[in-house]
Amino acid sequence: MYTLIAIVILIIFFLSVALRILNEYERGVIFRLGRVIKAKGPGLIILIPLIDKMVKVSLRLVAMDVDPQDVISRDNVSVKVNAVIYFRVIDPIKAVIEVENYSYAMSQLAQTTLRSVCGQAELDDLLSEREKINDHLQEILDTHTDPWGIKVANVELKHIDLPQEMQRSMAKQAEAERERRAKVINADGEYQAAAKLAEASEIIRDHPMALQLRYLQTMREISSEQNTTTIFPFPLELFKPFLHKLDPGEADKDD
């Protein structure tokens, strides 16, 4: 009786130690007497008690937030920059053997790389060319983490905190730029209006009746607004003799 109980206990102990179940996104790196056998999973894994040891590794995409770093840009502006890194383990064996703690190593490498890359760029580049800097960071991190069996999928700069003095200076610069654009647009509008008026004057000079037609159209617009003022047009022919006397060119022609 006691023997049967002992056997049952040993079987239960064996099963609890020998059997492991891994999820679809997990892999188990098997060590047998200290030597790596292979990475197994997912599903049911059978281990030899006291001989085999398994280390679980997740293959899911990890989003790591990089702590804000104090950076001095190439044009000597002090800013705080933080980022987020997306990476995943593609080789579980390398991730366990080549580095002690790949998450901690990735965090430290990301911080130093972020300071180095952002310190080589000017402030305007940090603000306007984030995509280029993101690609550069991703390339450097991916190169360094490839021996660890880790693939860096993407790197994104999240926040760039500027000093208050710099924010005020940039606000003044933006306001001055908006005023400059407004003045340029206004001047361009005045130029176009003057050009159109010049064209209209040439048309009226070549076709004097166009002015009278325009005058009649203006009267129609005024009358449609139900004004109490009455306007009587005078034919331009009434003033033509006076215009001939005032125009020396016409007098020369008559001579």
Image (cartoon, grey):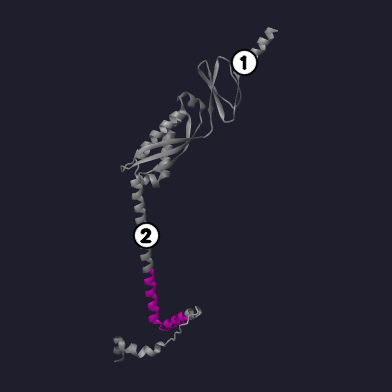
Q: Residue at x 69, y 9 (%)?
A: 4
- Residue type highlighted by circle 1: Phe
Which range is magenta?
Answer: 191-219
Q: Quadrant of residue 243?
A: bottom left
Residue found at the far right of this picture: 1
The majority secondary structure of the magenta stretch comes to helix
Q: Is residue 207 magenta?
A: yes
Q: Quadrant of the N terminus?
A: top right
Identify residue for label 2: 181
Q: What whole-number distance in Å separates the C-alpha atoms at marks 2 and 1?
A: 80 Å
Q: Is residue 170 above or below residue 85?
A: below
x then y, percent, for residue 192: 38, 69
Residue 166 lies in the magenta stretch:
no
**Mark 2 element type:** helix
Furthest-bottom residue in view? 255
On screen, residue 90 versus residue 236, left or right, reads right
Q: Amino acid at mark 2?
A: Arg
Q: Are marks 2 and 1 in contact (CB under 8 Å)?
A: no
For the C terminus, the quadrant is bottom left
For label 2, the crowd category at 10 Å Cα-Cα, with few meaning under 14, some 14 to 19 and many 20 or more, is few
Furthest toward the top, the residue is 2
Of residues 239 and 220, the one nearer the viewer is 220
209 to 123, vertically: above or below: below
Res 14 label: 1
Q: Quadrant of residue 132?
A: top left
Residue 19 location, x and y as percent? Answer: 61, 20
